[in-house]
């Protein structure tokens, strides 16, 4: 077995981290470590099964490619520490949004479909044409910057065929906008939030519709 094997894809920063170890049926003593900031989304056994062919370069390459294609793993580094022990360092993609409940957008702009998720992800759900994913992300970031003032978090952004943006927060506040006049509507949203923070009525609002040319329609909780 080679003294050092390295399989590399460009590095990335993550928000969460942990460290774990696993043995795989006595074939090799595998010490699997997630990078410090890795979100730890990939099952340990999935990684372990992908690294049983360390003495077969072609099989190992195929197994690793399958791992990259079907999991959150972005980078794997393998090296021996003892004759029958290998140390495996794993880095994962960091998801920032899910597109149409199928594909995940990562922090570095990749679109992946890893399948199984081991933990609940509190990320925004984008619903709309895939070619609009960058624009929907921009909408998410800009609207979220205003909602941070209210301690609210966007859970869903849906783009309809008529250009309507329906933005829903974690506490079911709905904000209706559109792409066509988004910049002006965002400015009005900022002004409205500032006013309602003073009035103290912001928590009573159920829906805000900013598609009007110069105004805003507000629906209050009954």
Image: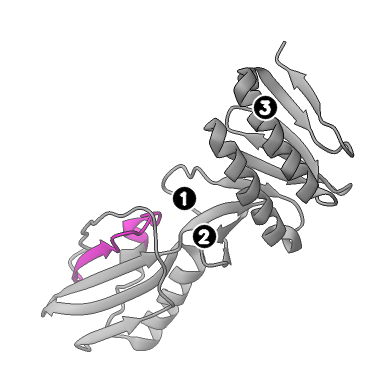
Report the residue at 57% width, 67% height from top. 109
Residue occupied by mark 3 = 195
Gap in angstroms between the C-alphas marked 2 and 1: 8 Å
Dividing the picture into quarters, in which one does residue 191 lie? top right
Gap in angstroms between the C-alphas marked 1 and 3: 41 Å
Which tag is nearer the camera, tag 3 or tag 2? 3
Q: Earlier in the sequence, mark 1 or mark 3?
A: 1
Q: Would you call the spot at circle 2 few (<14 residues within 10 Å), some (14-19), or many (20 or more)?
A: some
**Residue 114 — which label?**
2
Along the viewing direction, whichever of 52 and 30 lies nearer the viewer: 30
Q: Would you call the spot at circle 3 few (<14 residues within 10 Å), some (14-19), or many (20 or more)?
A: few
Horizontal and vertical percent for residue 113?
Answer: 57, 61
Q: Earlier in the sequence, mark 3 or mark 2?
A: 2
Horizontal and vertical percent for residue 110?
Answer: 57, 67
Gap in angstroms between the C-alphas marked 3 and 2: 43 Å
Which tag is nearer the camera, tag 1 or tag 3? 3
- In the rendered structure, are the residues bearing label 1 and label 3 in contact, judged by CB atoms less than 8 Å apart? no
The span picked out in magenta is 27-46
Left or right of 11 on screen, residue 113 = right
- Outermost residue, left direction? 82
Q: Is residue 39 magenta?
A: yes
- In the rendered structure, are the residues bearing label 2 and label 1 in contact, judged by CB atoms less than 8 Å apart? yes
The N terminus: image quadrant? bottom left
Residue occupied by mark 1 = 117
């Amino acid at each position: 077995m080679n003294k050092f094997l390295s399989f590399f894809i460009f590095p990335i920063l993550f928000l969460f981290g942990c460290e774990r170890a696993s043995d795989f049926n006595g074939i090799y003593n595998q010490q699997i470590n997630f990078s410090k900031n890795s979100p730890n989304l990939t099952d340990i056994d999935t990684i372990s099964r992908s690294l049983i062919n360390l003495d077969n370069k072609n099989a190992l390459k195929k197994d690793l490619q399958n791992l990259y294609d079907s999991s959150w793993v972005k980078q794997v580094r393998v090296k021996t520490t003892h004759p029958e022990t290998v140390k495996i360092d794993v880095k994962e993609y960091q998801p920032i949004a899910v597109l149409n409940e199928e594909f995940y957008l990562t922090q570095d702009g990749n679109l992946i479909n890893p399948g199984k998720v081991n933990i609940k992800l509190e990320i925004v759900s984008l619903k709309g044409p895939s070619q609009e994913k960058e624009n929907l992300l921009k909408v998410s970031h800009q609207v979220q910057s205003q909602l941070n003032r209210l301690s609210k978090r966007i859970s869903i952004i849906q783009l309809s065929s008529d250009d309507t943006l329906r933005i829903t927060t974690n506490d079911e506040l709905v904000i209706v906008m559109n792409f066509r006049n988004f910049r002006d509507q965002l400015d009005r949203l900022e002004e409205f939030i500032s006013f309602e923070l003073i009035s103290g009525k912001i928590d009573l609002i159920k829906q805000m519709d900013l598609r009007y040319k110069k105004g805003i329609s507000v629906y209050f909780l009954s």
